[in-house]
Amino acid sequence: MLRSVLISLAAHLAIFLIAWLGLPELFEETPLELQSISVEVVTVDEFSAAPTKALPKPKAEEKPKPKPAPKPEPKPVPKPEPKPEPKPEPKPAPKPEPKPEPKVEPKPQPKPEPKPVPKPEVKKEPTPTPEKPKPKPVEAKKPEPKPEPKPEPKKQPDPEPKRTLADILKDVRKTEPSAQPTPQDTPEDTPEDNASEVVATRLDARLTMSELDAVKRQIERCWSPPAGAKEAGNFAVEIHVSANPDGTVRQARISNSGEIGGDPSRRTIAESALRAVLNPQCSPLKLPLDKYEMWRTFTFNFDMREMLGL
């Protein structure tokens, strides 16, 4: 600490002395030294009478001598290629030593066959004389049974003709009621249809949500929403599906045609949903084949808000 204080005082003192002693010399004006110039006065007459000196001719510039061209360097003499060293002659391969001949082993002498042991003689017992069989009583001949008449082969029912998509849509239009349906015009469902729909609902309830979502995504790819589908509101199309064991759709129909009524936009949406289910590009359906008894008939719900993401 003391050392730094002393150094600071010494530096301040030196700055003060330099400023005090050196300032007067800095501000002193140095006198200008004027050089004396000799001037000769010449009159105009003397200047005009003075002979004009001939101007010296400019000397011709001497052209520099051209430098001599450098002598070309002598080409290096190629060194003679070294002669290849003579290859040493290969040594002759040593002759293989002769293999010793294998010793012939003496054949083993055959063993003498053992003599067969004599079997003890078995004394033959005297065979008893068989008793004479008693004569069987003569049975009365039974009448031969008449051959049963072969049943006539049952006639197989004619296979149902394959129905096209246009035929199914025509049937759907026929089953739809008029704009103002009356209670007499609406057809009553048969017990078979009601039973199939009940079974379909039960089987649909047994499937897992992931399996139903997989089928829904598959059919959604084949469905193109028609114009005016967004204005349909809370409308849903229920399609009753009958499937084959391999997952292909065998038959499909609209099960809630009564809700469609005479609305042309709803009819168009229902027909587009039916076409999507019957589209061969979306068949077979992605359902577990081991659960065929559960999804052989099921009802697919086409909810417009869910399908359009509203």
Image (cartoon, rainbow, N blue to C red):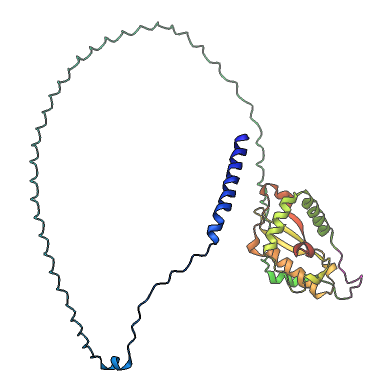
Tell me which corner region of the image, top left, top right, bottom left or bottom right, holds residue 227: bottom right
Tell me which corner region of the image, top left, top right, bottom left or bottom right, holds residue 7: top right
On the rendered structure, is 91 left or right of 119? left
Q: Quadrant of the N terminus?
A: top right
Q: Residue at x 65, y 36 (%)?
A: 141
Q: Is residue 103 above or below residue 227?
A: above
**Residue 201 x, y percent position in the rendering:** 80, 54
**Residue 36 x, y percent position in the rendering:** 38, 74
**Residue 241 x, y percent position in the rendering:** 74, 59
**Residue 94 x, y percent position in the rendering:** 11, 28
Residue 156 visible to the viewer: no
Q: Nearer the viewer, residue 130 or 182?
A: 182
Residue 166 visible to the viewer: yes
Q: Is residue 15 above or below residue 42?
A: above
Q: Nearer the viewer, residue 31 or 208?
A: 31
Decide whether the magenta segment is chiefly helix, strand or loop: loop
Q: Nearer the viewer, residue 176 or 185?
A: 176
On the rendered structure, is 70 left or right of 109? left
Q: Quadrant of the C terminus?
A: bottom right
Residue 141 drawn in magenta: no
What's drawn in magenta, residue-wise?
180-188
Q: Residue at x 82, y 64 (%)?
A: 256
Q: Is residue 83 above or below residue 171?
A: above
Q: Residue at x 81, y 59 (%)?
A: 193
Q: Residue at x 26, y 10 (%)?
A: 111
